[in-house]
Amino acid sequence: MNILLFAAVDLVAIAVLAIGLYLPRHRRRDLVVSYFGINIGVFAVAAALSGSSVGIGMGLGLFGVLSIIRLRSTELEQHEIAYYFCALAIGLIAGMAPDPLWLPIALIALILLVMFAADGSKVLPRYRHQEIRPGPGLGRRRGAARLSVLGPSRCLDPPVHGAAGGSGQ
């Protein structure tokens, strides 16, 4: 009976994480599907293994293997990796359904609370990260530059990489 309770807790938690927190803030539907898929997959495997004598070592090994496979498949931003690990952790905690009953629910709530606070605009209200790629008319030597806007009137100028010596550009 506890597995049904934890399945419901897992579904609510991943919906809050992916649809309630991630999607309104970052607007990438493809990763919402990925977060749901990896969470439910980890939950199912962890629930199946929790009844066997394999133990927590297998669960942590599964967590590591899935992380390596997913993180090597596409380039992700740091906040996307954080959401990804939270989706994995929620699925693993809910699937293993440890005792006492309140402990996994409290851990999942803690994960959601930390992500709500850490990724909110109140933590870094004036910070924005933007990638700028010059068009074909600017030449290949300059490559991609990153710009961090620190406030309404201050910004950091990125260095130009690959320019030969200081010969006028």
Image: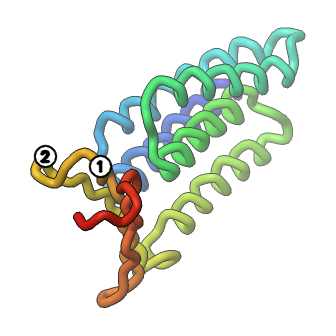
At horizontal 44% and vertical 36% (from top left) the residue drawn is: 75
Q: Please state, as top left, top right, bottom left or bottom right, where the C terminus lies in the image.
A: bottom left
In the image, 62: left or right of 135?
right
Camera-side mark, 1 or 2: 1
**Residue 62 place in picture, x, y as percent:** 71, 20
Which residue is depicted at the point 16% across and 54% down?
138
Front residue of 147 and 129: 147
Residue type beneath disc 1 = Arg
Q: Is residue 138 left or right of residue 113?
A: left
Q: Which residue is drawn at the image coordinates 55% and 68% (left, top)?
A: 117
Instruction: Please name the residue shown 14% across and 50% down the image.
Output: 135
Residue 63: mark in rendering: none
Residue at the disc numbered 1: 141
- Residue 51: x and y in percent read 80, 13
Q: Quadrant of the N terminus?
A: top right
Label 2 sits on residue: 136
User: Measured along the vertical axis of the image, is residue 62 above or below residue 117?
Assistant: above
